[in-house]
Amino acid sequence: MELLQLQYFITVARLEHVTEAARSLHVTQSSLSKTIARLEDDLGAPLFDRTGRRLRLNEFGSRFLCRAERALFELEQGKQEIKDLANLEHRTLELAVTAASMLPNILREFRKKRPSVHFHVQMLATQEMVALLLSGAVDVCLSSPPVQGDDIECQIVYMDPIVVAVPKGHHLANRKKVSLIELRDEWFVGVKRGYGTRDRVDAVCESAGFVPQYVYEGDEPARLSALVEAEIGIAFMPNSARNSREDIHYIQVEDHEMVREIALLWHKSRYISQAALEFREVVVEYFRSMC
């Protein structure tokens, strides 16, 4: 059995048409048909039911397809592993995050460990991040909320309290704690739906009997502090994102559990590069030092 036979078989199985498969593979229909026939001879059973140039997988073909796809996937992962080992110092680490407030410090620590490894970071909503992880386009994700899935490994690394940020001079600015229902008539600035903190906050507020009123919804969490300082609105913010601005006061929510879980995500089956493994170690150690 040859690798080329498996590649041709998988293409035909997906398209179920000899002409289309031959065009996709850039080979003649005759060559493709002969290759599939040799594979069936090797296996001792037909893999397709044939009607003209249309092919449909039979029971033998359906079972073999799962094995063939797995074999090619493992070979591709092996190829990536060898490439990674040979070029560790020149690899680009692909990262996707929904929880970015502590990312600069984490990247600084990682760069100390691997100064020659480049990284590319994308700030994404949860669904976009998961799609890229499953496709193999990113190596590791730093996510809030955690994401569960058959192909996703999820390790919770930190429990980050969510606080209320108000500008200096606000009627709540002298408070250390506030009841959630006291905020029902306030105007908020926040990120758009789809980001973990926003979705978590909205759900808790709804359980308290109100829907937050947003005057600003954006894609950049880092901009919220400036908007609060400018008295555009108040904000729910992760405690880890608070800064030392004198014109902002942070208040604890006292009657509901307002916390976001931060998790590392990676693909269960895909090869994990040495750079990605070391990045995960840096993340875990960073959050452990905060506890």
Image: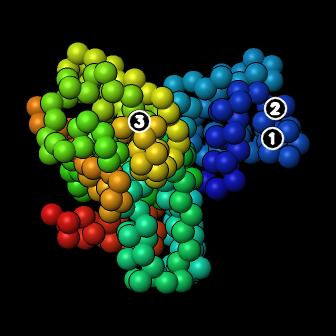
The residue sitting at 76% across, 27% down in the picture is: 17
Q: Are marks 2 and 1 in contact (CB under 8 Å)?
A: yes
Answer above or below: position of 21 versus 52: below
Q: Secondary structure at mark 1?
A: helix
The disc at residue 24 is: 1
Crowd class of label 1 (few under 14; some 14 to 19; many from 20; radius 10 Å): few
Q: How is the image coloured?
A: rainbow
**Residue sitting nearer the eye, 127 or 24:** 127
The disc at residue 233 is: 3
The residue sitting at 50% across, 33% down in the picture is: 216
Answer above or below: position of 161 versus 186: below
The residue sitting at 75% across, 17% down in the picture is: 51
Identity, as a three-letter code, of the amino acid under mark 1: Ser
Crowd class of label 2 (few under 14; some 14 to 19; many from 20; radius 10 Å): some
Q: Where does the C terminus fall, quadrant-wise?
A: bottom left
The residue sitting at 16% across, 42% down in the picture is: 175
Lateral position of residue 197 relative to residue 17, left or right = left
Mark 1 to mark 3 CA distance (whole Å):
55 Å
- Where does the image place residue 27, in percent across and percent down from the top left? 86, 46
- Where does the image place residue 281, in percent across and percent down from the top left? 31, 70
Q: Which residue is mark 2?
A: 20
Q: Is residue 62 visible?
A: yes
Identity, as a three-letter code, of the amino acid under mark 3: Gly
Q: Secondary structure at mark 3?
A: loop
